[in-house]
Image: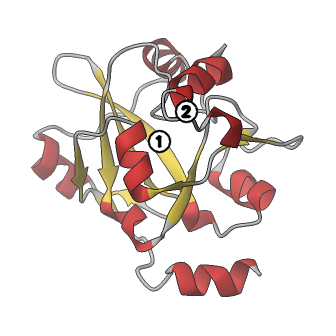
Amino acid sequence: MSLQSVKEHLKKFSREQDILEYDEISATVEQAAAALNVIPARIAKTLSFKDKEGNAFLVVAAGDAKIDNKKFKSTFGIKAKMLSAEEVEHFTGHVVGGVCPFGLAHDLDVYLDISLKRFSTVFPACGSINSAIELTCDELFEYSYAKDWVDVGKDWDASLTDEVAAATEA
């Protein structure tokens, strides 16, 4: 169901046929990177958080980024509190490991972390634990109906760029 809702969502942009599905599980950043033969930083991981009212919202960040609690609180006015696996599935319609900002079960606010901007293309999941799609950052912003770019990540390697990725992935 979840992969199907993503296909329906991406059909609006004529990109449903570009979803990559593979035999191995890609539920973690490392698994997805191995399945796609890319560096982990290029995996666009979707993180689910709860706001003050108990509603969910999503932050998509590079695979090598962690959430910086101080930046998060400064940006969103709340402490970073991730959803439980059950809440993630309820709000997004996707299982953990396949969460993405497309084909959502509920209308959620989506934000993109600047850690993604160092790459010309990134790979978000597509609603299942063995799917992804290669998108430019502009496409990710458009297709996810993102509200804004935010700076809430830490520990990501700014020296990992398209050039470094190309040399590593070759």
Looking at the picture, how far across and down is residue 74, in whole percent?
Answer: 11, 51
Q: Which residue does the image show at 41% across and 62% down from the upper left?
A: 116
Q: Amino acid under label 1?
A: Thr
**Which of the 4 image quadrants contains residue 23?**
top right
Label of residue 149 in the image: none
Q: CA distance from mark 2 to mark 1?
A: 6 Å
Looking at the picture, how far across and down is residue 51, in whole percent?
Answer: 22, 26
Q: Which residue does the image show at 75% across and 58% down from the upper left?
A: 36
First along the sequence among labels 2 and 1? 1
Q: Which residue is mark 1?
A: 46
Looking at the picture, how far across and down is residue 12, in whole percent?
Answer: 49, 27
Answer above or below: position of 163 versus 19: below
Query: Which quarter shows the N terminus?
Result: top right
Looking at the picture, how far across and down is residue 138, in whole percent?
Answer: 38, 55
- Mark 2 and mark 1 residues within 8 Å of each other at the beta carbon: yes
Q: Which residue does the image show at 70% across and 36% down from the upper left?
A: 17
Hey, which residue is sitting farthest front in the picture? 14
Q: Characterize the local packing of mark 2: few (<14), some (14-19) or many (20 or more) Cα atoms within 10 angstroms.
A: many
Query: Which quarter shows the C terminus?
Result: bottom right
Q: Nearer the viewer, residue 23 or 66?
A: 23
Q: Is residue 89 visible?
A: yes
Q: Amino acid under label 2?
A: Val
Label of residue 99 in the image: 2
Q: Characterize the local packing of mark 1: few (<14), some (14-19) or many (20 or more) Cα atoms within 10 angstroms.
A: many
Q: Is residue 95 visible?
A: no
Hey, which residue is sitting farthest right in the picture? 23
SS at mark 2? Answer: loop
Answer above or below: position of 70 versus 11: below
SS at mark 1? Answer: strand
